[in-house]
Amino acid sequence: MVTSFRCFFCLCRGSLGALIVGLLLSGCSVYSRVDDIQVESRQPIEDWIYKLDMPVSHSGDVLLMLGFSGGGTRAAAFSYGVLKELRNVRYTENGRSVSLLDTVDSISSVSGGSFTAAYYGLFGDRIFEDYEQAFLKNNVQKILLNGILNPLNWWKMLTTGFDRTELAVDYYDKYIFEGKTFADLKASGGPYIQINATDLGMGNRFSFTQGYFDLICADYDSFSVARAVAASSAVPIAFAPVVLQNYDTCTIKYPDWFAATRQRAQGDLRLAELIRAVDSYREKKKRRFIHLVDGGITDNLGIRALYDRVSLLGGTKRAAAQLAKRNNVQKLVLILVNAQTHAAQPMEASADEPPVSQVIDAVTDAQLQRYNTESLVLLEYNLRKWAADLSRPGHEIKSYFINVGFDAIGDKDRRQMFNNIATNFALPADEVDQLVDTARSLLRADPEFKRLVRDIKKGW
């Protein structure tokens, strides 16, 4: 997501009729569809907080985490390119040949990056066979606009809560994710996939994980992956929020040690905000329905979830308990696939007062840029700190923070060309190919990635 308003105009460009019809139908819609299923638990749920953490799916000495940013098809293609390059790097582990892609433990994603994360999580290496045709090089934007303009859908939109978002969910479910649920995602045997959206009522991140579904007493396994991805990429105005019901049929019990986390939050504003958001889901009468929109609003890089998990668990020492089966971990790796753009501002070419749309774009981009920078600094610093905290005499853990983004493109004109790629769900095939190839070359050239590959192959 670049800005919600820019994405809105991109989605509707060239079709004023679609824009008018979409807004009218949205205004006349009576209600939104609620598609989560309540669960009843006679015993208090005591281990939910651990479910907010990251399960470890690989047994080697590399703990490898990926963060996929927002940015529509641009972000999806860029992250896909990184997956292709990770598959290309092979080394010997315990006497067998493996790729770096095989060692990926988790992927945290928002918006456009969630398409790639979910597809790889469900289908594994099949992504390299059909993902380009299923999504990257498919004009999904045109398909969705045609659905809005189809008179057969208008009555449904007026009477059943079927809206632009439901149109997208239906398409994603049928043609991209093949009706899969989170039970299928868990059974796939791949890395832990954390799809992130924004809780519009609280202004905080909501993750499609077992832990968050425990908080709202909803069934995680039966929930549609397509609906989660639609929520993660639901640009405000262009798409209606995805709505979940916050049921009151279960009881959450906080662990005894969580009192210390609350105490620590008195001097940590970030942690206090996170706890406030978690606590809010217990206010069942006040927060009966949770409205979810684009995850890029609260974390356009897709990496804050990692920091939040460790903070909520009480720091790296307690989080280390989750790595009890991984005493051999020697390398803590975070690769951020950053499709953030810095497009040229048309207003700078004229002394005239800029149009309202340009002002909104510039203001939103400035806020987004500052928050992204804060996230980068925060995660890079804490990754080093976590590695130091988890190290012990005779067992040093090294950290590697790898940021793959357009800023690393050396040629100025080529860098600007990538920064001008629109945030939407329709890109020419040659732009998709360039994004994929550039992601691969940027990852190969990154100094931290080179250090990682060298250390792995030498067994350091």
Image (cartoon, helix red, strand yellow):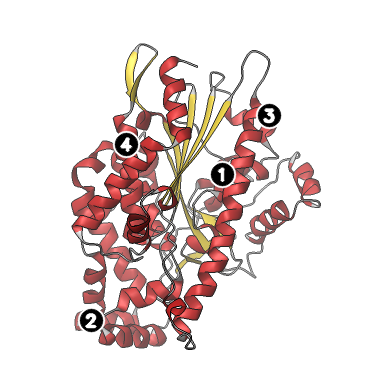
Density class for disc 4 (Cα within 10 Å; few <14, some 14-19, many ≥20) is: many
Mark 4: amino acid:
Glu
Residue 126 in picture, x, y percent from top left:
23, 40
Q: Does the CB distance between marks 4 and 2 fall below 8 Å?
A: no
Q: Mark 4 or mark 1: which comes first in sequence?
A: 4
Residue 34 in picture, x, y percent from top left:
43, 67
- Up the image or down, 75 lies above or below 309; here it is below
Q: Which residue does the image show at 32% across and 55% down from the upper left?
A: 414
Mark 2: amino acid:
Leu
Q: Quadrant of residue 417?
A: bottom left
| Rendered image: mark on residue 266 | none
In the rendered image, which residue does mark 3 sit on?
A: 389
In the image, 84 versus 117, the foreground residue is 84
In the rendered image, which residue does mark 1 sit on?
A: 306
In the image, 9 versus 290, the foreground residue is 9
Q: Secondary structure at mark 2?
A: helix
In the rendered image, which residue does mark 2 sit on?
A: 149
Residue 397 in picture, x, y percent from top left:
59, 24
Mark 3: amino acid:
Asp
Q: Secondary structure at mark 3?
A: helix
Q: Which residue does the image show at 27% across and 45% down from the upper left?
A: 437
Q: CA distance from mark 3 to mark 4?
A: 30 Å
Q: Does the CB distance between marks 3 and 2 fall below 8 Å?
A: no
Where is the N terminus found, in terms of image quarters? bottom left
Asked if residue 80 shows in the view, the reply is yes
Q: CA distance from mark 3 to mark 1?
A: 16 Å
Q: Secondary structure at mark 4?
A: helix
